[in-house]
Image (spheres, rainbow, N blue to C red):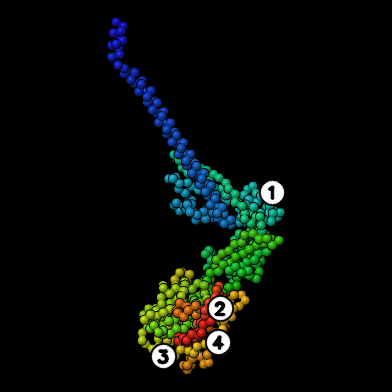
Amino acid sequence: MTRLSDLRRARAGFTLVEVMVAAFVLLVGVLSTVMLFDSANGATTRTRNNDQATNLTRELIEGARSIPYEKVSSPGVVTNLQLLPGLEDIDGGAYTLRRRGVNYLIGIDVCIMDDPKDGGGVRAATATFCANSAAAGTADKNPEDYKRVTVSVSWTENGRTRSSRQTGLINNPGSASGPAVRSIAPVGYGAPYVVATDVSTVLFEVTTSSKPAIVSWLLDGTRQSSPVTQSGTTGLVWRFNWAMQTLDDGAYVIAAEAADIYGVSGPGRQETVTLNRFPPRAPTQVTGGRTKFGTVEIEWTANSERDVVGYQVFRVGASAPVCAIATQKLDAFCTDPSPPDTDPLEYYVRAYDRDTSGNLRASPDSNHLMVVKSNNAPFPVTNLVLTKLANGDTKLTWKRATPEDPDSGDSAAFFRIYRDGVTLADRYARYFDGSGNANVTWTDTNTSSSHTYRVTAVDQRYAESPFTAPVSG
């Protein structure tokens, strides 16, 4: 009976209670496994985000080290960091960087450290020193030992704000040498520095990292003799005047250097200042004439102003420029390819710069050039001699023809030097000699090897004389 009862029980299967208990045990196991995976994924995400934040703080500190030392300051360092590739702000608001789908809010603090080991020094009123710096004093002649940059990065993760923070030190490149120039700027002008009015002088202010024995300034790399004087009592602010009334318009580089009592200087600084006070002067020495090719050539001496952007050549009576600025640019040679058969033809040239709004601004017209059909070529020059100078330059000397031109009232306007050939491409230089001397001298300062030279005379109506016999050397 017992065996039969057991057999019947086995065939009957599991009770409902047993199935529910088994299902509960299985559910607990599955849920535990799912929670384990979820917890692991969450930990992985937190670790990844934290690693990205840590790497980002290091990247920002290294970026700050690549910025010029004087520009590492609060809040200016943020502006300069955003100019570096990969560190651009994503939305134009608070400085925010995006990495792998996560937005990181950036905070940067900069302070100057005056190491207590060498005592305290004189401090500029605008400088921010770290709280644990040495007290201000006079013992340290260069109190800016280094800058401390603190970068904090924060982000939101599952509704919670997390953050990472790291500090880096940037050594003062001038701390081991002389005083460094921290800034140089014209007083009363904002960057970019443009002087647009007719003033006789511009006042510059220079600030230094420590009190120097002397401050000097340079114009386009040339040291200037006008004095630099101390402003105020700290010894960290200096001023000088730039007398620029006689200078042409254009861009100039103004630099300053500071040195200690031993003549040792720290890093200097420079800024570009643009003079844009006047329209260009009218082009000068405009010459030209008809050629054997049926064209008219016009050439002139390029303007000396640095801000000239191009030229245009006009023929009186024509509806448009013969040579427009778009193609002419700064070339001081123009060809009228299809001049009319009118005699004479009249041409003039204008130079152009840009005003402070960026618009083209024209010079007065040059002297008008009259081009005539009937004109005889001037007589050739004679006695061409080449002399090699001790410094490697080549000097050419020749004698004017007497008379210079067969036409009454005409004479040689200038001389043309050809080098290594007799074609248009071999025209090497124009030389205007206003001395009137019978013997003319011209020097080629660009001679790295031997060359062959020929000289012609060009008259007031652009007719060109035959070539001289060649000379070489």
Q: Three-letter amino acid code at disc 3? A: Ser
Residue located beneath label 3 in the image: 374
Q: Residue 73: x, y in percent?
A: 57, 54
Q: Residue at x 44, y 39 (%)?
A: 158
Q: Which mark is residue 117?
A: 1
- The 10 Å Cα crowd at callout 3, few under 14, some 14 to 19, many 20 or more, is few
Residue at disc 3, secondary structure:
loop
Residue depth check, mark 1 versus mark 3: number of the one nearer the observer? 3
Residue located beneath label 4 in the image: 383
Residue depth check, mark 1 versus mark 4: number of the one nearer the observer? 4
Residue located beneath label 2 in the image: 473
Q: Is residue 46 left or right of residue 255?
A: left
Residue at disc 4, secondary structure:
strand
Tell which of 357 and 233 is nearer to you: 357
Tell which of 353 and 400 is nearer to you: 400
Sequence-first disc among 1 and 4: 1
Q: Residue 24: x, y in percent?
A: 37, 23
Considering the image in quadrants, where does the C terminus appear? bottom right
Q: Three-letter amino acid code at disc 2? A: Gly
Sequence-first disc among 4 and 2: 4
Q: Three-letter amino acid code at disc 1? A: Lys
